[in-house]
Image: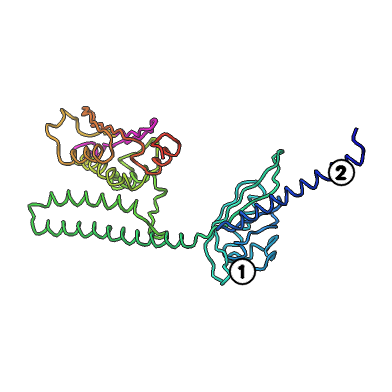
Amino acid sequence: MPSDADRLRDAEAELAATITALAESEAKFRAIADSMPQMVWSTLPDGFHDYYNARWYEFTGVPAGSTDGEGWNGMFHPEDQDRARARWKHSLETGEPYEIEYRLRRHDGVYRWTLGRAMPIHDEAGRITRWFGTCTDIDDLKRMEQAKELLSQELSHRIKNIFAVVSALVALSARQHPEARAFAASLRTRINALARAHEFVRPHTESSRPTVGSMTLHTFLNALFAAYVSDTGEARIRVSGDDTVFDDQAATSVALLFHELATNASKYGALSCDEGSVLLTTSLVADRYHFEWVERGGPTIVAEPERRGFGSSLAQLSVEGQLGGRLSQIWNPEGLEVFVDLPATALSRRRHALKSASGDGASA
C-alpha cells in the first residue's frame, strides 16, 4: 500500500504534468493567434477583456495592456462607441454571438471599418466560461462596395434617361406621322411599363428609393396597377394571396406580362366597363409559383379570338421564354381567366440561393 509520501510525490508529479500541459497549450494558442491576420481577443464571462494578440497591438499601436477591461471602446470612432457598447452588452446578457461593423482607430490615427465578431465558450453545465473574438479590417472591401454601388447607380440613372429619351422620340415621331399615333401610343405605354419596372429594381440611394414599401412581388404589382382605379379611387385590379421576395431578374418579364393583360382588359375586357374588375391571386405551391388572373364584370365573351395579337404573343414570350413557365387562357363567357405557372426561383435569385444552400438545388 502506497505511503503518504508516495501519494504526495504522485500528486506533485501529476500537478507538474498538468501545469506543463497547460503551458504548452497556451504557448500553442498564442503562436496560432499571433500568426493570424485578424486581431484576436478574449474576455472573462462578464466581458472583461484580458487578452489581445500581437496583431491588435500592431494595428492600434497602443501599449500592451492599455485596452484591457473597458479600454477597447475608446479605440472606436466616437459615432460608433455607444452602438458597439450596447451590442456587446446585449450579447453578454443573452449569450448571443456578437457581430458588428465599426470604425477602429489605426496606429496612424486613421479610422478603418472593421468587422467584430465573438462567440461564447460554455462548460458542461452550459455556463459561459469565456468569450473569444476577432476583429477583421474590411475597410478596403467597404470602399470597393461603395465604388461599385456608385457605378451601378450611375449606370442605372443613364438607363432611366434612355427610357425617357426613347419615349420622347416616339411621341415626336407620332406628331410628325399622325397615321402612326395609335401605334406610337401603344409603344409608349410599353416603354413606360418597362421604365416603372426598372425604377423599382434599380439601385437606389435613401433619397431616391421608392416609398411604397418593401420590394416584394405584391408591392411591385400594386405599383404597376396604380393607374387602374375607379372614379372613387378604388383599385380595379386587386392583388391577393402569397407574396414572395422579388428582384430585377424577373421584373422586366413580369412587368410586360401584366402590362399587356391590364391593357387588353382596359380595351376589350373587364376594365373596359365601369363595373368591371380584375382579381389577381398568387400562390406558392411547393417549388412553383402560380398566378390566377380573373376578369369579371366586362363584356360577355362569345368565343375565343381567332387570332392572337402582339400583346398576347408578348405575354406568352415573357412567361415561357424569359421565366421558364407556362401560360394558359380560358375564355369564359363571364370573363377571361389567365393561369401562369412558374418555378419559384424564376422570381428571385435569393430564393434560388436559399434553395441551393439547403441542398435542394445543384450541389456546390
Residue in the picture at 13% in, 49% down? 183
Residue 288 in magenta? yes
Mark identifier at residue 61: 1
In magenta, the rendered stretch is: 268-292
Q: Amino acid at mark 1?
A: Gly
Mark identifier at residue 321: none
Q: Quadrant of residue 330?
A: top left
Q: Position of residue 75 (x, y in %)?
A: 61, 65
Q: Nearer the viewer, residue 220 or 268?
A: 220
Q: Nearer the viewer, residue 102 or 202?
A: 102
Residue to which mark 2 is pinned: 9
Q: Quadrant of the C terminus?
A: top left
Q: Position of residue 145 (x, y in %)?
A: 42, 59
The local secondary structure at tag 1 comes to loop
Q: Position of residue 202 (x, y in %)?
A: 34, 54
Residue in the picture at 17% in, 48% down? 186
Q: Earlier in the sequence, mark 2 or mark 1?
A: 2
Residue in the picture at 16% in, 56% down? 170
Query: For this view, does 98 lie left or right of residue 175?
Result: right
